[in-house]
Image (cartoon, rainbow, N blue to C red):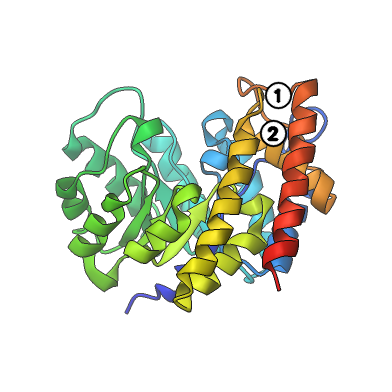
Amino acid sequence: MRNLEKYMGIIPAFYACYDKDDNISPDGVRALTNYFVEKGVKGVYVNGSSGECIYQSVEDKKVILENVMDAAKGKLTVIAHVACNNTADSMELAQHAQSLGVDAIAAIPPIYFHLPEYAIASYWNDISSAAPDTDFIIYNIPQLAGVSLTMGLFAKMRENPRVIGVKNSSMPVQDIQMFKQAAGDSYIIFNGPDEQFISGRVIGAQGAIGGTYGAMPELFLKMDEYVKAGKLEEAKQIQYAVNEIIYKMCSAHGNMYGVIKAILKINEGLELGGVRKPLPSLTEEDKAIADQAAEMIRNAKEAFLK
């Protein structure tokens, strides 16, 4: 019997943590992991888009995951995104993740070349075969990967008994409904777009993984609590406030994850570094945006966390 309950809740996407020389900072990784444990989230999604996975080496990803697992000490559900743009590296990371005892691995489809669906299925199944005792989650983010998870491909992947669900980051909320209807309760569908958190949850998502959760986990935890209690008007008010914060963070010239790391330094005292090139660093003007967004988060927590 599958244990899906451990995935049902707020799972922030983990941020890349760098030292002053732009190398992975084990201390930063551990500090961020401890922060999430203290905030009471369900788990973390490591080495995904928010973790700047496209710009990490295989060794970088191993170091990050090793430090997350060591710091979490079983207190968090850990999902490790292991996809690289070749099968061999992805399988190596899947095997490594299983050896550390992660709860699940996840993968986007290969990017750049437009592969036929049977080749994408083979890629995912090869990755899964390297971690035969570990749950597998499909990561659907067509606006970045350039490939959509079709209902036919999803059906093909459900032939793999290790596949337990989909992290759905496509923008149409209807996709969550379609995946959920097709798969039933023995699979879990995660809401991806943070701006649609309550919409995704209401239409069928049982869990949620998001890139801005880490900046304001308390607000997403409160929304989740309200959705479970059927208090949708209260949840909606927080969603509106959260979305304004997200719009503010996205208004910077630099990359949004750089803004989030600046916010975490302001509000939480976390030193996580910047972002890795070619992602653009924050400009001098962006510091004011980070200050404003940090204040908006503080004000929202004061208004809604009663």
For residue 41, side relative to residue 306 (left or right): left
In the figure, is residue 298 to the left or right of 185? right
Is 238 in front, or is 126?
238
Q: CA distance from mark 1 to mark 2?
A: 7 Å
Residue of label 2: 258
Q: Is residue 26 visible?
A: no
Q: Which residue sits at x=40%, y=67%?
A: 206
User: Tag 2: residue type?
Assistant: Gly
Q: Position of residue 80 (x, y in %)?
A: 51, 52
The location of residue 127, given as percent across then percent down, is 36, 47
- Which residue: 81% across, 50% down? 267
Compared across the picture, whether 254 is left or right of 231 comes to right
Q: Position of residue 130 (x, y in %)?
A: 38, 51
Q: Secondary structure at mark 2?
A: helix
User: Which labelled disc corresponds to residue 88?
Assistant: none
Left or right side of 246 for 274:
right
Q: Amino acid at mark 1?
A: Ser
Residue lying at 59% horizontally and 42% vertically, measured from the top left: 246
Describe the element under mark 1 as helix, strand or loop: loop
Q: Are marks 1 and 2 in contact (CB under 8 Å)?
A: yes
Residue beneath the point at 69% across and 34% down: 258
- Placement of 173 over or under 141, stated as above or below: below
**Which is nearer the eye, 69 or 261?**
261
Q: Mark 1 packing: few (<14 Cα in 10 Å), some, or many (20+)?
A: some
10, above or below 123, in the image: below
* 1 or 2: tag closer to the N-terminus: 2
Picture disc at residue 281 = 1
Question: Picture quarter containing residue 25?
Answer: top right
Q: Position of residue 100 (x, y in %)?
A: 56, 59
